[in-house]
Image (cartoon, rainbow, N blue to C red):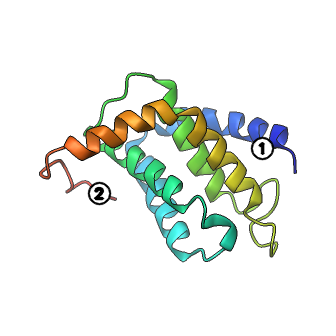
Amino acid sequence: MSDHRSKKRLKRLTRTAETLLHQPSRLREKLTEASKKLGQTNSGQLQGIKDQLTELIEFSQDLLRGNYQTVDVKTPVMVIAAILYFLLPIDSIPDFILGLGYLDDVTVITFVYRQLSNELEKYRAWRADAPTDIDDDARP
């Protein structure tokens, strides 16, 4: 599996992510689906990125609720595209292939996480300072 192939697929998913940003109920469904899949996946390959993927999902949920406002418009699109890639059951390496199934997911999540490291640093700082009564009622 090549990084180039995963990046190309991720780029196609950005168009879907852009659409989902304008469809909050569908985006909420996808974020819930990603959280469930992550919770049900026991793959050792994902252990190294579970925290990163969890943070990307939480970042998206806070954006969706309007709790966190990002400056760069591309950031939410990249995050959502990476989450959508994780949700694909058959991607560059199908998830059901033992030993290799999540390798491409790890590559994509790691790539996006690194690309957005500055924005995610700001997000972590915001979360640390955010009041505890932010809009949690809208949690998917």
Q: What residue is pinned by disc 2?
A: 139
Q: Position of residue 34 (x, y in %)?
A: 52, 60
Q: Is mark 1 on a helix, strand or loop?
A: helix
Question: Which quarter of the picture shows residue 48?
Answer: bottom right
Above or below: residue 102 compared with residue 55: below
Percent x, y of residue 29: 44, 56
Rendered residue at 32%/44% (across/down)? 62
Depth check, mark 2 against mark 1: the one in front is 1
Camera-side residue: 104 or 26?
A: 104
- Seen at 46% across and 23% down, the residue is 73
In the rendered structure, which amino acid carries the disc numbered 1?
Ser
Q: Quadrant of residue 82?
A: top right
Q: What amino acid is found at the position of numbered circle 2 in the picture?
A: Arg
N-term mark: 2 or 1: 1
Quadrant in which the C terminus is drawn: bottom left
Image location of residue 19, percent across then percent down:
52, 34
Where does the image place residue 138, in percent across and percent down from the top left? 25, 54
For the point 69% across and 55% down, which residue is it?
105
Q: Is residue 126 visible?
A: yes
Q: Residue 6 carries which label?
A: 1
